[in-house]
Amino acid sequence: MDVVQKVKDLMNLALDERTPEKEAKEAGIGALRLIARYELLGAAGGKRIDVAASIIEKITSPGFAEGVATRAEKIADSVERVLGSVDRVKGVTRRSGAKRGGGRRYGGR
């Protein structure tokens, strides 16, 4: 259950003019109980907003993008080195005279 959405729904119900007075009061009290129980207005509520803002700030900073690009280039270089090593190993096995499917042929001769 998304608590924030539940609080919004209860607030909308409480503030809607078409809602009967008793039901509106109960919805308002329910919203307040959820706010208090999950500390949505206290330190935890502010912390949620701060964390989201810091993530957005970090992702949009030029230093972060530069760091990601540098790491991606290092990974690409490492992959190139591995593939080069594989090619060298293939060359060594071919030069060593390893037979591929050689041997006698059995056929209609």
Image (cartoon, grey):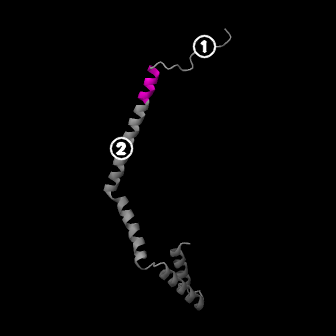
Residue topped by disc 2: 74
Q: Is residue 96 above or below residue 36?
A: above
The three-letter code of the residue at mark 1 reads Arg
Q: Position of residue 2 (x, y in %)?
A: 53, 72
Query: Residue at coordinates 45% horizontally, 20% vertically from top-left?
Result: 96
Q: Main secondary structure of the magenta part?
A: helix
Label 2 neighbour load within 10 Å: few <14, some 14-19, many 20+: few
Say left or right for 52 vs 62. Answer: right
Task: Point out the residue furthest to the bottom here.
Answer: 21
Between marks 1 and 2, how big is the CA–CA gap? 49 Å
Task: Point out the residue furthest to the top here.
Answer: 109
The three-letter code of the residue at mark 2 reads Lys
Query: Residue at coordinates 38% horizontally, 67% vertically from top-left?
Result: 53
Q: Position of residue 88 (x, y in %)?
A: 41, 28
Span highlighted in magenta in the image: 87-95
Total tally of numbered discs in the picture: 2
Q: Position of residue 71 (x, y in %)?
A: 36, 48
| Image quadrant where residue 19 sits | bottom right
